[in-house]
Image (cartoon, rainbow, N blue to C red):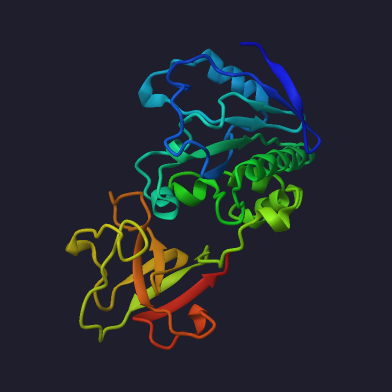
Amino acid sequence: MSKKKIGTWNGVPVYTDFLPFGTRRTGQKLTTGKPRFAVFHDTGNPDTTAQDNVNYYRNTYNIDWAMVASAHVFVDDKEAIICIPVTEKAWHVLYDTPTDNAWYGVDANDGAFGIEACYFKNKERSMKSLDNACRIAAVFCESWTINPKNEMPGHQDIQADKQDPGNILAACGYGRRDMKVIDNLVVGYMKGKSKSLKKQPKTIFNWTGKFTTHKTNKEPIVVRKQPGLKGTMVDKNSWIYPNQYIKFDQIIKKDGYWWLGFYYQQKGASKNRFYMPVGKIEDKDEKILNEKHLWGKLEVEKHGK
């Protein structure tokens, strides 16, 4: 199927250049029927264009399943190319990662579209590419009633071993985890944003630090694979016992408790993020730093978004 221009969206020329059916594009419809959320990526390949990446996918359209990856849309500093319809499945987030299920109730491959932003050694090109990607994301988010503030995580937010879109953020001079830059751009390009955005209280904070449980705790803290009281518990040997500590990179409000997201540091440990409650939400303003009865000492090193 040949490349075809379908319009100009928010000032960006948009083309379809659909992949042939194979492993990268199977033609399977999203389990959710339509995109329930979005995942923002960058290509991980500096100085490659949208067309370069689509061509690579086309030339390897039936790659071995062990190596397969794909995405719906590629955007650079000149154009956007849709290579898989956003109502079809693409393989842009690892199935074994639990965070997308915990946040949205479905695997990203089964219920989200993936948008890939190209980046370059030239900062101006990277900034234009990021801006274009946010313009295109805005059109999709508005079309499918997706709130970019809480329904468009970065790949690195939901899969522990990834660092995108941190690459393009860094190429533009921003912090690698500064997703609010992307969120704010997308919101700004959405039409009638006051009507389409679903205002929801913020429940996830990308803060980093250390938490040490009190020596006087009578019970260990149960660790779960997903945040919340319904999350799957890990083996008791991996619970956090009195006078132990973890280094966290997320604080979450859920089910009336404060939860910390963290990674086990032991050699050979799982690369997935795990979650533990550290106390009930009791402060009237729901600010964790004001809490008086947490189950240990909270030391915050960095406030993220």
Say above or below: 21 vs 305.
Answer: above
Residue 174 shows in this picture: no
Say above or below: 55 vs 186.
Answer: above
Residue under the image location 62 percent in, 51 percent down: 148
In this view, the residue in front, 282 or 193, is 193
Horizontal arrangement in the rendering, residue 57 relative to residue 102 (left or right) = right
Where residue 108 sits in the image (x, y, percent)? 45, 41
Corner quadrant of residue 233: bottom left
In this view, the residue in front, 37 or 19, is 37
Residue at the far left in the pictured view: 236
Where residue 57 sits in the image (x, y, percent)? 54, 20
Corner quadrant of residue 102: bottom left
Residue under the image location 36 percent in, 68 percent down: 246
Where residue 222 sits in the image (x, y, percent)? 26, 68
Where residue 203 sits in the image (x, y, percent)? 50, 66
Residue 101 shows in this picture: yes
Corner quadrant of residue 298: bottom left
Say above or below: 113 vs 15.
Answer: below
